[in-house]
Every structure is written in structure tokens, then in C-alpha cells.
Amino acid sequence: MYFEIIGEIEDREVIAKGPSVRDRARLTAQFGRGKWKKLKGRATVCLSSGDTCRVELHWYEAHGIGRRKFKIKRFLE
């Protein structure tokens, strides 16, 4: 990961769940079976360059497995 999340993720919102998650087969093969959901939220991150900024994140999450595959979708500041 080229960034580290600082603090809490705010404004969490479910984008897709169940069969609507397109990468469900890959996630199941890589991390195991679970009720996968794709979520988005906003957080402050520290980039590998040392800069701190506010971003919109997307990630996958399943009960018992946790959060996986974080991705910065856009910079808010």
C-alpha cells in the first residue's frame, strides 16, 4: 500500500453487496468465503511521500474477514 490511513473513515456508504460485487469470485479465491460488500468513505491519509491529504477511499469488506483492497479514488483537497 502506498498510503496509510490516519484516524477514522467517515461517511461510510455501501456501493454494492452480494451478487452486485463484480470481483466477488476473485475476493473469495484470495481471502475466503464471506458476504462481500464494496464500500466508500472519506479519510485522511499519509502518502508514501510524507504528504497528508483528505481522500475518498473505496474498499471491500466481509464479516469475519475484514477490510481488504483499499484504493484512493480521488483527492478531496
Image: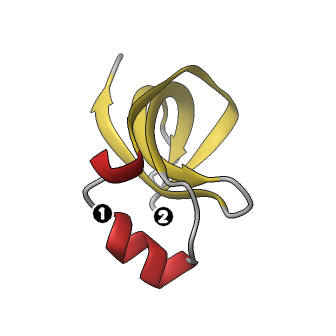
Foreground disc of the pair 2, 1? 1
**Left or right of 33: which side holds 73?**
left
Q: Which mark is residue 23?
A: 1
x and y percent of residue 58 in the render?
A: 40, 41
For label 2, the SS is loop
Residue at 43% from the left image edge and 71% from the top image edge = 27
In the rendered view, would you say 56 is above or below 38?
above
Q: 66 and 10: which one is in front?
A: 66
For label 1, the SS is loop
Q: Disc 2 marks which amino acid?
A: Met
Total marks shown come to: 2
Residue at 45% from the left image edge and 37% from the top image edge = 39
Write down the quadrant of residue 6 in the picture: top right
Q: 34 and 47: which one is in front?
A: 34
Single out the residue that lies furthest toward the front. Answer: 19
Determine whether label 2 and label 1 are within 8 Å by CB.
no
- Choose the circle earlier in sequence order: 2 or 1: 2
x and y percent of residue 73 in the render?
A: 29, 37
Q: Disc 1 marks which amino acid?
A: Asp
Q: 23 and 73: which one is in front?
A: 23
Residue at 48% from the left image edge and 38% from the top image edge = 51
Provide the residue designation for mark 2: 1
In the rendered view, would you say 55 is above or below 20?
above
